């Protein structure tokens, strides 16, 4: 059973190219893992706060990930909603890379 | 007492509501008055033909803004109030009930209404159209397992209602006057994929089906075609397009052309009156012609741009048109303006879907239509949209080749 604040393995760091996002499901929850153009990893809640659409199918541009359905945008570094129709912030999660393995703290 | 200056918005749909918010966040210090003809808070229309008809419980409209947010932004919302006339000389609009509102600048976001059938209809027949939450509730209450639904018009509204109704157990027939579905909206190959989805779900589709008249038949309606065929229905849904609400603008002497005529900054023929959303026909720089769009994203983007221009920014509205429709578990997305040409470049993604691209004679990408799962098509349509906006001339063979990433063609 997952305890609060536990580091959970996501993938190897080469599994996600820069400016791409992937879906990660764990413990009945879903997350979007994002890799920036510079190669850094970030994690936020997976579903857009406007409708239940997964953000991992959206475009990553600069510090923004965009919902593929209605183009609400979020700053993936903070989870902050940045453009309508998204107006509710998403939660962000700590992430770390250890020996080329990516972990999320959930 | 000198009255505080006011920005007045007529119409509280996506465009009007987006404008009200943008006026305040854009720094307007005076009054912001949003006048809507419906009694509810402003709400999203896209779910009316989809989730609202199919969910087990009616969860009510999905509001665009909360009452609290309206208060925070000091937006005065006049709900359930019709605007009767505009007096341009005195900068005033008169409201049902007799109140006069003086405007600094005025936004007309009056939307569109369903087009009616041009054939004889027995006044006793229950004909449904779908535009408002009240319309959706009325349709929802009629839908029950085994009931017969006849949808007149194989366009988006008709097909979305057909999909929703069949999922509720209704027996559904779509009557389309044209030789195929979605004639003006999508290429033939995508229309064929959508038709297959409907047939698989159990919807009957009749093409070249011109309705000649509708008469009452006890509790039901009898729909007759020009070729003599008849269809009995518990519910007749008419989805044959929409007409822009231009009457208020017309009576005030504003220029009308395919809608309320606007420049590329969304100003009407009166520089203090702007227009946005389904009622607005504007000059689109990308296409070099006047276009009027009846689509969700355009409505709120135009509302925001009109608001900025009411505050003096002078920005052209150049957004690439974008549209989506859900058909069962798949999504259709269109970027740009599909000119009803079958000279498409097809990128065949097999069972997962298809994207059709359209190039202008000079090689510029002007439209892309995708059908498939959201994950399959949405990224490429979004990239295509950016390419259209940047007037890129992609290589046709590369567009057709699924092994070549669309993203690699953006330069």
Image (spheres, rainbow, N blue to C red):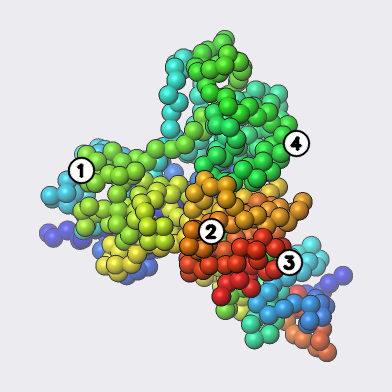
Whichever of callouts 1 and 2 sits on the residue coming sooner in the sequence is 1
- Nearer-the-camera pick, B316 or B90: B316
Residue that carries the numbered disc 4 in the rendered image: B200
- Nearer-the-camera pick, B101 or B53: B53
Residue B402 relative to residue B23: left or right: right
Whichever of callouts 4 and 1 sits on the residue coming sooner in the sequence is 4
Question: Do callouts 3 and 4 mark residues in contact (Cβ within 8 Å)?
Answer: no
Q: SS class of the residue under badge 2?
A: strand
Residue that carries the numbered disc 3 in the rendered image: B403
Whichever of callouts 3 and 2 sits on the residue coming sooner in the sequence is 2
Callout 4: chain:
B
Rendered residue at 48%/62% (across/down): B362
Q: Position of residue A17 (x, y in %)?
A: 72, 78
Residue B359's tag is: 2
Residue B295 relative to residue A1: left or right: left
Q: Position of residue A69 (x, y in %)?
A: 60, 58
Front position among marks 4 and 1: 4
Rendered residue at 22%/46% (across/down): B254
Whichever of callouts 4 and 2 sits on the residue coming sooner in the sequence is 4
Q: Look at the image and tell me whether residue B218 can be seen.
A: yes
Residue that carries the numbered disc 1 in the rendered image: B252
Rendered residue at 59%/37% (across/down): B181
């Amino acid at each position: 059973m997952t305890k609060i604040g536990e580091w959970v393995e996501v993938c190897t760091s080469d599994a996600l190219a820069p400016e791409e996002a992937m879906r990660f499901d764990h413990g009945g929850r879903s997350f979007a893992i994002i890799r920036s153009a510079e190669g850094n990893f970030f994690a936020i809640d997976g579903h857009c706060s406007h409708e239940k659409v997964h953000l991992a199918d959206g475009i990553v541009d600069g510090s923004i990930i965009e919902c593929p359905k209605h183009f609400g945008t979020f700053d993936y570094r903070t989870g902050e909603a940045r453009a309508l129709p998204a107006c509710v912030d998403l939660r962000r999660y700590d992430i770390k890379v250890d020996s080329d393995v990516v972990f999320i703290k959930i | 007492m000198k009255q505080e200056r006011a920005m007045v918005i007529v119409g509280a749909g996506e465009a009007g509501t987006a404008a009200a918010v943008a006026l305040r966040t854009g720094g307007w210090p005076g009054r912001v008055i949003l006048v809507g003809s419906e009694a509810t808070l402003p709400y999203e229309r896209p779910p009316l033909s989809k989730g609202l008809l199919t969910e087990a419980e009616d969860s009510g409209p999905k509001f665009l803004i909360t009452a609290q947010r309206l208060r925070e932004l000091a937006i005065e919302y006049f709900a359930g109030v019709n605007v009767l006339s505009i007096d341009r000389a005195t900068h005033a609009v008169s409201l049902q009930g007799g109140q006069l509102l003086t405007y600094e600048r005025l936004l007309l976001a009056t939307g569109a209404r369903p087009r009616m059938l041009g054939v004889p209809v027995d006044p006793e027949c229950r004909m449904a159209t779908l535009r408002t939450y009240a319309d959706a509730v009325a349709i929802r209450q009629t839908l029950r397992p085994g009931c017969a639904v006849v949808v007149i018009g194989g366009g988006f509204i008709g097909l979305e209602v057909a999909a929703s109704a069949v999922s509720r157990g209704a027996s559904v027939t779509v009557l389309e006057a044209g030789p195929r579905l979605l004639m003006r909206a999508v290429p033939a190959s995508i229309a064929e994929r959508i038709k297959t989805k409907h047939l698989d779900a159990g919807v009957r589709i009749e093409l070249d089906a011109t309705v000649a008249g509708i008469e009452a038949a006890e509790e039901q309606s009898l729909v007759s075609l020009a070729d003599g065929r008849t269809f009995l229905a518990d519910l007749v849904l008419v989805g044959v397009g929409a007409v822009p609400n231009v009457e208020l603008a017309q009576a005030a002497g504003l220029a009308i052309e395919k809608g309320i005529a606007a420049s590329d900054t969304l100003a009407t023929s009166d520089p203090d009156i702007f227009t946005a959303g389904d009622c607005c026909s504007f000059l689109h720089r990308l296409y070099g012609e006047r276009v009027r769009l009846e689509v969700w994203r355009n409505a709120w983007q135009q509302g925001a741009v009109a608001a900025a221009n009411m505050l003096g920014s002078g920005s052209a509205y150049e957004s690439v048109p974008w549209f989506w429709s859900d058909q069962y578990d798949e999504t259709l997305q269109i970027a740009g303006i599909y000119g009803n040409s079958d000279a498409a470049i097809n990128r065949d993604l097999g069972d997962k879907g298809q994207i059709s691209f359209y190039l202008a004679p000079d090689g510029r990408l002007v439209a892309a239509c995708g059908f498939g799962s959201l994950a399959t098509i949405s990224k490429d349509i979004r990239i295509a949209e950016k390419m259209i906006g940047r007037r890129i001339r992609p290589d046709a063979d590369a567009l057709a080749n699924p092994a070549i990433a669309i993203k690699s063609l953006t330069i």
